[in-house]
Amino acid sequence: MRLGPIALLTASQGITRILVRTVEDDVVLKAALLPSYWGGGPHVRAIPTLLEAMALWHQSPVRAVISARDVASWSALGLADALDHGVTTAHYTVEMRVPVRERGQRIRGLGSFVDAQQLDLAGVR
């Protein structure tokens, strides 16, 4: 089985940040999802659909790693089950990680991706 892309997801102050890399460390997507016009977070199917699309594009499952400071918000988006564990589908696997307090490499543009870099420092490969 071919290794698929890794998606690093974080949320803070209503903004959901996504950094997707291949196993060769090529960044293929860097996105900041802003709060919806009507308030609240993104649509319940927005992030799962994005992960499915990435898996179909790369023709291999995506490994999604989430900064799990606030598991309830990820659960509301369909990325965590009733026991607050990450879900697994045919297209992606979700892994919850506790944020690490180390300083990571700076990524410019679309705001700060420090939280996503923290997941990288925690050994996500």
Image (spheres, rainbow, N blue to C red):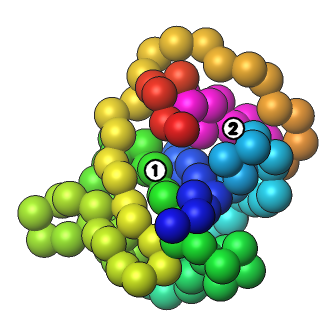
Q: Nearer the viewer, residue 119 or 109?
A: 119
Classify mark 2: helix, strand or loop: loop
**Residue under the point 74% across and 20% down:** 105
Q: In terms of sequence position, does the residue under pointer 1 or pointer 2 come before the other?
A: 1
Q: Secondary structure at mark 1?
A: strand
User: Which residue sits at x=40%, y=75%?
Assistant: 77
| 16 or 53: nearer the viewer | 53
Q: For the point 48% across and 79% down, which residue is it?
A: 91
Q: Residue furthest top?
A: 102
Q: What residue would you read off at disc 2?
A: 113
Quarter placement of the C terminus: top right
Q: How many marks?
A: 2
Amino acid at dot 2: Phe
Instruction: State the image coordinates of residue 68 (x, y, percent, origin top left).
Output: 34, 45
Residue 75 shows in this picture: no
Instruction: State the extent of the magenta-drawn residues as a range.
Output: 111-120
Q: Is residue 78 above or below residue 95?
A: below
Q: Position of residue 52 (x, y in %)?
A: 57, 82
Looking at the image, residue 92 lies above or below residue 118: below
